[in-house]
Each structure stands twice: as C-alpha cells, then as structure tokens.
Image (cartoon, rainbow, N blue to C red):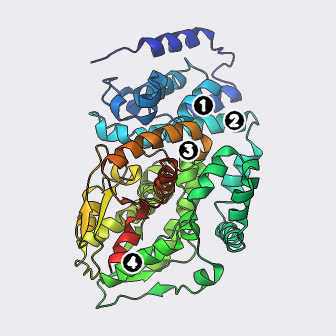
Amino acid sequence: MTTKIPELMNLTERAGSETPHAETPHTPVAAAREALLGKFDMDELLNCMHCGFCLPTCPTYQQTGLETYSPRGRIALMKGVAEEKLAIDAEFEKNMYACLGCRACETACPSGIAYGQLIETAREVVEDNKKRQGKRSFTRKMIFKNVFPHPKRIRAFGTALWVAQALGLQKAANRTGLMRILPREIAEMQHAVARIASPVQRKQRSPMLPSEKEPILKIGFFKGCIMDEMFYETNQATARLLSKAGCDVVFVEDQACCGALHAHSGEKSGAANLAKRNIEAFERAGVDFVVNNAGGCGAALKDYGHWFTHDPEWRGRADSFVAKVRDANELLVELPPLTFHKPLNVRVTYQDSCHLAHGQGVRNQPRQLIRSIPGVDLVEMSHPDSCCGSAGIYNIMNFDMSMDILDDKMEDVQRTKAHMIVTANPGCLLQMREGIMRAGLQGQMEAVHIMDLLDRAL
C-alpha cells in the first residue's frame, strides 16, 4: 500500500513554511478562521489510508493522472488546509471543483469514507472564505439566492424556453449560426434539450392522481425544479406507473428545489433552507413515502439528516423525512408487478446514475424493471457505473473535461450495439443525448429515462 504521496507531501510541507500565521488565537479574525476550518471532519479525513483503491474509479484521475485530481489527493489537500499547512487559494479551489462528485470512490473505499460529504465541506469552506473576503460573484449570488429557491422563477424560465421552441427560435438560431454567440458549452448542450411541455399542459395537472385499483400507499411525489420544467412528461409517466401499481400520487404543494446544486457548490446554508421547506411541505401532506425519479435529487433528499447533524431542532425531523424517501425504481419493485402489454423488441443498455448507484446503492432495481418488459434485451456496458460527465452543472462549468469523459463513455456504449441508452437521472439523460450527437449516432440510438421506457410498454 502507498503510505506517502511525495507530490502532496512536498506541497503541504512547502505551504506550511510559507503560509503566514499573523493572527493570534484571541483575535476575531483568528476565531472566524478557526470556525471556518472547524467545518472539516478531521476524523473522516484521517481515515483515508492512501491505499489507492479509489484511483481506478475516479474519472478525473483517469483523464489526467494527477494525484491532486484523485479522491485521496483531494483528501490530502483538505487535510493540509484544515491543519493550516495549505492556504484556501485558487489552486485549492480548482482542485476541489475539478471533482465531479460522482462518489464512485465511496463504493471502492475499504474504509467507507463519506467522500461526498468531504468534498461538499471543502467547497463550503472555499465559498465561505470568499464571502469573508467580499469576493462572492454576482452570477453565483443570482443563481443560488435569486433563482433556484423560487419555483415561480424556474417556471418562468421553462415558459420562456417553451416559447422559444414553439416559435422556432431555437432552430433558427442553430440554422443561422446565431447560437454561436453563446458560450461554447451552452451552445453545445442546448442541442440535447428536447421539446418541453407547454404552460397549458402543466396547468392541467391534477393535484392528485388516484390509484387505478384499491390504494396500497399514499405517495408524495417530489417533482424537482428543473426536472418538472424540462422533463414534465417523465414526471407524468412516473406518476402513471405508481398509480397503476396501487398508489395515490400527491403532487405536494409548496415543495422546493432539493438543494443538491447548492450543496455541491458550497452553499450549504442555502441547501439547508431548501431542505427545511421540503420537510415542512411533506410533513403537512401526511404521505407514506416521498418518491422521486432523479438520482441526484434522491441522493440529496436522503442526505438531509447529515445536513442537520449539528442542528438538534431539525435533525429528528430530517431523519423522519429521510426514512420515507424512495427512488421510484426502489418502490416499484416492492409493489405488485406491473402488467406490460406492449413488447418493445429493442436492445438497451443501462447507464447507472452515479448518485443513484454510488450515492443510494440502487443498482439492481432498475435492471429488474427493464428485464420485466417483454421484448427488451438488456446488454451491459463494461463499466455501466462510470460517470458520464454530467454531474449537475459540471458539463457547463468544466466542459472540456466533461466531454472527454463522455466520449470515453460513448465508446463503452457503442460496444453494446444498443438501440437505447436508459438512465434514471435528468442530467445523465441530457449528457447521453449529447454523447449520441457527438458520436454521430442520431437516428440509430436514443437516450431514454427508465420511467418513460416503462410507460411506453404500458
């Protein structure tokens, strides 16, 4: 086993001799710094044995070969910062945000280190340090404070996108080259956005979809923010499946964004505020389970207990909420089997959502559901649980790295000779659509959410 990483040891030793310690322990500045660095869980950081089992599973390490782009390297950097041997500088920030947060290293780690929580804490330290220095960007403040916490503003974005599609503005901009005035990553990824539901369709949704038979459960459906705007039909398909399986499906009022993007971006207080709104909303609804169909959202919902570790007022309520959270795949395999009437006669491969597989441990259930569809031939990739490069907004913020990871994934996909790539997360779905276009496979292959695939067979 590797017990010492020379590259990082040299870095931390050098930084330790260069980092000034001007403040005394009694100054307000020193107290604030101590509170900031106290966010790190030193016990968890020290649990890392530097064994290297995480290296083959880490997409960014595989792309670069850099120790600082590996989980154990990032943990060593966090430890260096926590012990004040390294500064919270641009280099530390770059290394922390280069991580996809896919959590594949958690599956591989023999010590069971909660790396996802560590990387979120590291980013929180970065962002809180910026706030102390008055360096918070206007764009970040607008997105995390003025957009995602407000469902009506997200709906307005969805309506604007529908108008652009309905009037043909998106196609015209692509045809004339006008789209090239946008940043390259936005111009590329917009091709993967399918036609979204109209405002009229969304308004026609009933607050509850009753069970088609004697109800077994009362389900609170977690719609998601972007999910419900860009993938409204997938949400509707999920509700229909649950209804056919014996559930009263309630579209709970006053729910908010799950908080995942906030947590992954170092905005932990904003994530906690959104979590409180959701906990309260679903408590009022009095449901048996909280069900979602997005791997990333589900992982965040199941992490609410950790977000309130040091908040006794909310910890119990968060734990009760988490106990009710289920991914739609999890619940559907526990309910009476669905009866499929339409053989699909198609060859599919399943792309594991990182936050569903590594974050929630849900792997077999989606495959069990896919195999239950008549005429479906499920062919596994060599590495179905390797990240596709989407990772929330990673494919926007780190476009080149994201596309390199995606191209490797598509090579694995093509070896299956599948007609469909099935996944269980909206970000993965958009990314795989982009991958199909990059590989020139339009017309030969399509990317489909598993709930839409199951709904087709009904």
Front tag of 1 and 3:
3
In the displayed structure, 119 sits above or below 410; it is above
- The span from disc 1 to disc 4 (Cα, nearest Å) is 41 Å
Front tag of 3 and 2:
3
Q: Which mark is residue 93?
A: 1
- The span from disc 1 to disc 3 (Cα, nearest Å) is 14 Å
Q: Is residue 89 visible?
A: no
Residue at 36% in and 65% down: 326
Residue carrying label 3? 394
Residue carrying label 4? 219
Q: Position of residue 455 (x, y in %)?
A: 37, 76
Return the disc, 1 or 3, that comes first in the chain's sequence: 1
Q: Position of residue 388 (x, y in %)?
A: 44, 46
In the displayed structure, 428 sits above or below 151; it is above
Verify CB contact (< 8 Å) between mark 2 and mark 4: no
Q: Amino acid at mark 1?
A: Glu
Q: In the figure, residue 148 lies in which quadrant?
A: bottom right
Return the disc, 2 or 4, that comes first in the chain's sequence: 2
Residue carrying label 2? 130
Return the disc, 3 or 2, that comes first in the chain's sequence: 2
